[in-house]
Amino acid sequence: MSGQPRKPSDPVLELKLPRFYGSVPTLFGAPQAEQPGDLEGADIAFLGVPWQAPVPDSRIGAAGASYFGTNLTPQTFRTNSVKYGGFLPEMDVDVFEHLKLVDCGDVEISNDHATTFDNTVERVREIIRAGAMPFTIGGNSGPSTYGVLKGVGLEAGGPVTVVNFDAHHDNLEGEIEDDPPYLPRWGGTWARRILDLENIDPARYTHIGLRGPRNDKGVFERFIEKGAKRENIRTFWETYRARRTGYEDWIESVIAPNVEGAAKVWLAVDPDVLDMSVSQDFGDEPLGLHPEELCWGCYTVGKLAGRQRFGGIAFMAMPFDAMKLHWVMMYAFLYAMAGVVHAESE
Ligand SMILES: [Mn+2]
């Protein structure tokens, strides 16, 4: 070493972070799981689902933020994660001391939509069979919701509770086989379609944060038709009141009855459940949750489910370049896992 700064021609000899390719490290710098055998001993397995949905007419322009480039979200999410560790002083827990995280890379996305779904289901089943909890991130809804949850359901061996944080119903009618191949309608339909999946119990389906005029009049009826309960669809008025009456008690009372007796609990978060003021680089719906409310909700799900029943956590429709939003969602993930850790220590 000459003591001089490196020359552009000097080789880079050491990469301290495990990397998939180029400048993409693993999530939180976790060990890479390249082969199914690498999943041994893992508690949490991160899996990217880099699928970008076609942008529908209604979401062209600024409203299309959660569509454009979402195929890049898993890798930018990884890149943004490496400033964090797993210790939350406010919870006095280091998540990664208790739960071993590995990064499984991304699902292989195919031009053939059915193949993408099959690949996703298979990767998720592989993770669950190895005894780990899948942490998945889209892409848009479709493979990252229906595909992931299909795998969870097939391995569950009993009823699965879905806890879905979303401003929107996403339960429009229309079956998969009716979708035009060039414009699969997953974004607006997935929450209805999942209610037909094996082991997904519609009566346990819990929706938190529904609000606003992107929803239509049929929203409740379409859930009820599929077996969901009206009282499990929690709108802004309830979250708003809970701020005064005690949000922690309220969210526990909402989730606990639907977790009781479930074989698995799967947690889905569409970041638009957050208020549009939360992140300067994403959000087009006011009257949403604050980060602490989302984090506490995720913590509550983790704590009520516990290590054996926590069926996975999934983020979807997150723009690749919404850096501040990524960080909020990393908190949400860590809080869910802190709940799982605390469930074990009780
Ligand atoms: Mn939404």
Image: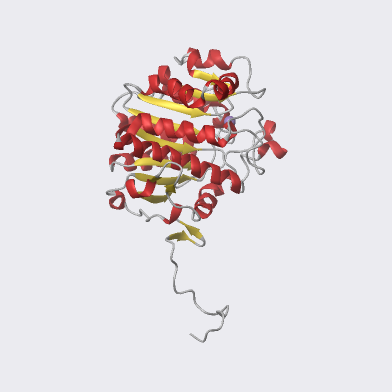
Measuring from the top left, give residue 251's x and y in whole percent.
47, 24
User: Nearest the camera: 257 or 60?
Assistant: 257
User: Nearest the camera: 214 or 5?
Assistant: 5
Query: Could you tell me how many numbered marks the image carries?
Result: 0
Which corner quadrant of the figure contains ligand 1?
Answer: top right
Measuring from the top left, give residue 302's x and y in whole percent.
39, 34
Residue 169 seen in this snapshot:
no
Looking at the rendering, in which quadrant would you find the C terminus? top left
Measuring from the top left, give residue 74's x and y in whole percent.
51, 48
- The single residue placed furthest to the bottom in the displayed view is 2
What kind of colouring is applied to the model shown? secondary structure
User: In the visual, does 44 lie left or right of 335?
Assistant: left
Residue 295 seen in this snapshot:
yes
Instruction: Relative to 188, say whether 220 is above or below.
Output: above
User: Nearest the camera: 188 or 269?
Assistant: 269
Measuring from the top left, give residue 310's x and y in whole percent.
36, 34
Instruction: Relative to 288, say whether 81 is above or below.
Output: below
User: Nearest the camera: 49 or 343?
Assistant: 343
- The single residue placed furthest to the right in the displayed view is 61
Q: Residue at x 49, y 28 (%)?
A: 164
Instruction: Relative to 67, say whether 190 is above or below.
Output: above
Quadrant for residue 133, please give it. top left
User: In the visual, does 127 lie left or right of 237?
Assistant: left
